[in-house]
Image: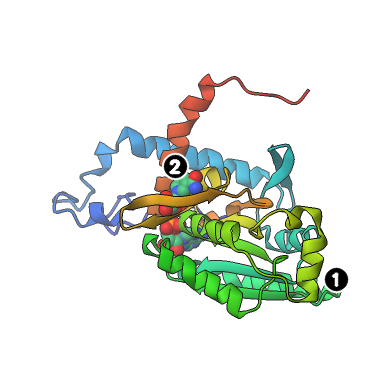
Amino acid sequence: MMAPLYRPTCYVRNCTRSRRSERSSPQHSDSHGRCRVFTEDSEWQRSTHLLEFILLTFLLVMAETDVYKVSILGKDSIHCGFHLVPYIARTVLDTLPASAYVLVTDTNIASLHLDAFKQGFKEELSRLGKQSRFLAHTITPGETSKSREGKAVIEDFLLLNKCTRDTVVLALGGGVIGDLVGFVAATLYVPICSFFHLRAVVHPYRRSMRGVRFVQIPTTLLAMVDSSVGGKTAIDTPHGKNLIGAFWQPEYIFIDAAFLETLPPREFSNGMAEVVKVSPILSFLPLQRDP
Ligand SMILES: NC(=O)c1ccc[n+]([C@@H]2O[C@H](COP(=O)([O-])OP(=O)(O)OC[C@H]3O[C@@H](n4cnc5c(N)ncnc54)[C@H](O)[C@@H]3O)[C@@H](O)[C@H]2O)c1
């Protein structure tokens, strides 16, 4: 069962506020030790709690094995569910044959979720009797990694490990990891020098294009509802954010809501802001329904 995303963490009696900045405020408690700002709860915070409640109710109603598929660009490539790691490993290995699967994440997420992926891929590879490699690479969290230098580090990792053009790159993380790893995948070009390269070049799709296939596994709410979906990838430069990039559609986007259990509340609010921003816009758009 999923733990509540917002826990009442205030140490003042009868207080349910969770933000550290509010707790440290001198105005925080009155002479009776009651939280003074509690009654001033903003509309924004109330709506965030309401949306969180709706999301949690939806997740609790979903069985753990349910996977909802959403079509994008005519392909059922968005798979949503709960505790999907074994499903992700099975789907990727079954449908995207490759000599190497390279998962890139940041150190925060690696400490929480990387072992599950290593285990999942190991089990599935031995079940299928495949010789493919599963490699994991971790980078420093934060926007500073989404740079030319950050891109070069991942490229060097792939090249040093002799990854070939049939490699599948998996981006496990928030918008930073998705944008950065997606751009590496879009621009990587590996010359032909082995059996696996040869196999890749024979494939008609691979023959005509640069770049390697990639899979998005978003772990922040913002990445789940926004950055992982549209195929936009980019890095920052000293002259501005997202100034160099490419469109590179992922083969799959696996939206596993269980990752939200470990997401810091502040990051959850960031994503919720995006949901609140987009919802009124969508309500004005005519929805296209399948016949
Ligand atoms: N490509 C697009 O269309 C698009 C759209 C919107 C935003 N973006 C980009 O997204 C980036 C911001 O992404 P973000 O808000 O996801 O931030 P982020 O990727 O920096 O992640 C925020 C922090 O949360 C941590 N984290 C992530 N998932 C976690 C989890 N499940 N448990 C614990 N910790 C976790 C990360 O380690 C990081 O420290 C920006 O660079 C922005 O430009 C891209």
Between 273 and 152, the one nearer to me in the picture: 152
Q: Earlier in the sequence, mark 1 or mark 2?
A: 1
Query: Mark 1 packing: few (<14 Cα in 10 Å), some, or many (20+)?
Result: few
Which residue bears the numbered disc 2? 272
* Rendering coords of residue 211 (x, y %): 63, 59
- Say how the picture is coloured: rainbow
Q: Are marks 1 and 2 in contact (CB under 8 Å)?
A: no
* Rendering coords of residue 23 (x, y %): 24, 55
Between 110 and 183, the one nearer to me in the picture: 183
Name which residue type carries label 2: Met
Does any portion of residue 79 appear in the rendered image? Answer: yes
- Compared to residue 203, the image places residue 76 above or below, namely above
Name the element at disc 1.
helix
Which residue bears the numbered disc 1? 128
What residue lies at 70% left-to-right and 24% top-to-bottom?
A: 289
* Rendering coords of residue 18 (x, y %): 34, 53
Q: Quadrant of the C terminus?
A: top right
Q: Which mark is residue 230?
A: none
- Compared to residue 106, the image places residue 238 above or below, namely above
Q: Is mark 2 within 8 Å of ligand 1?
A: no
Q: Is residue 136 left or right of residue 109?
A: right
Determine the quadrant in which ligand 1 lies. Answer: bottom left
Name the element at disc 2.
helix
Between 194 and 282, the one nearer to me in the picture: 194
What residue lies at 61% left-to-right and 41% top-to-bottom?
A: 58
Q: Quadrant of the N terminus?
A: bottom right
